Amino acid sequence: MTRGGGGIGDDALNLKFGYDRVWFPQDAQGIILATGTSYGAGAPVEGELSDTASELGGIALDAADEVYFMLNPRKWDADWTRDIHALVGFTLVTGSQTGIIFTLDMKGVAAGVLLGDAKVTPDVSKAFPTLAAVAVSNALNETLWTPMNVPGVFVGDSVIACALTMTSIGTAAADAIKLSYIDFRYTVGLTDENGPFRT
């Protein structure tokens, strides 16, 4: 997991808040079983890129395949009254394709509350903008940073259950798209329930 920073402003208060990022590579999200297979629909499997010289892999996705994972909002120094943004990084095994769409469903769960399917009863469901032109074989591609529209949604939650769906593979072949990572950025909070954050 890696983190980066910057700053965004609040004109009303004339303050500058920092923002940070949390990066989840495909093999560190808790979404792959010992067999290398996801619990989600389609049971997508992790595998090596066809460019074996890179020694890297990803989760092969077909249309409607799902990948599930959980986030721990209490481990982020985030201001959950503000929005977060996400992007998806992926590669193509072959060719340059169009019409690729990912969708991210998120569901906050507080302690003592039954865990449920984030895709069936989401707090928020957001499709990333359609990718009209995707780079050639095994090149790294990213969606646009996309607002999740979640200000105040996850305040007080212990975990955020997430489901990433390969909504459309466009003109790509089945399993030619390989998920590499999911990246989140958020506004750094000034305080949490225990007082000011320490840096």
Image (cartoon, rainbow, N blue to C red):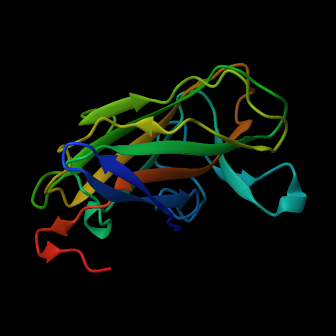
User: Is residue 166 rendered to the left or right of residue 75?
Assistant: right
Query: Is the residue 182 above or below the residue 197 in the image?
Result: above
Q: Is residue 149 above or below residue 111?
A: above
Left or right: residue 81 versus residue 39 is left
In the rendering, at what x and y percent does residue 5 appear? Answer: 47, 62
Residue at (11% x, 75% y) in the render: 194
Q: Position of residue 22 (x, y in %)?
A: 46, 60
Percent x, y of residue 100: 63, 25
Closer to us: 185 or 62: 185
Q: Is residue 96 visible?
A: yes
Image coordinates for residue 114, horizontal then vertical, percent: 15, 51
> Which corner quadrant holds the C terminus?
bottom left
Q: Nearer the viewer, residue 58 or 125?
A: 125
**Residue 62 located left or right of residue 67:** right
Q: Is residue 171 above or below residue 47?
A: above
Tell which of 6 and 15 is nearer to you. Answer: 15
* Number of callouts: 0
In which quadrant of the rendered view does residue 20 lie?
bottom left
Rendered image quadrant of residue 124: top left
Q: Write the residue at 59% across / 27% down.
A: 63
Residue found at the very far bottom of the displayed protein: 198
Please tell me which residue is depicted at 73% across the width and 19% down the height of the picture: 171
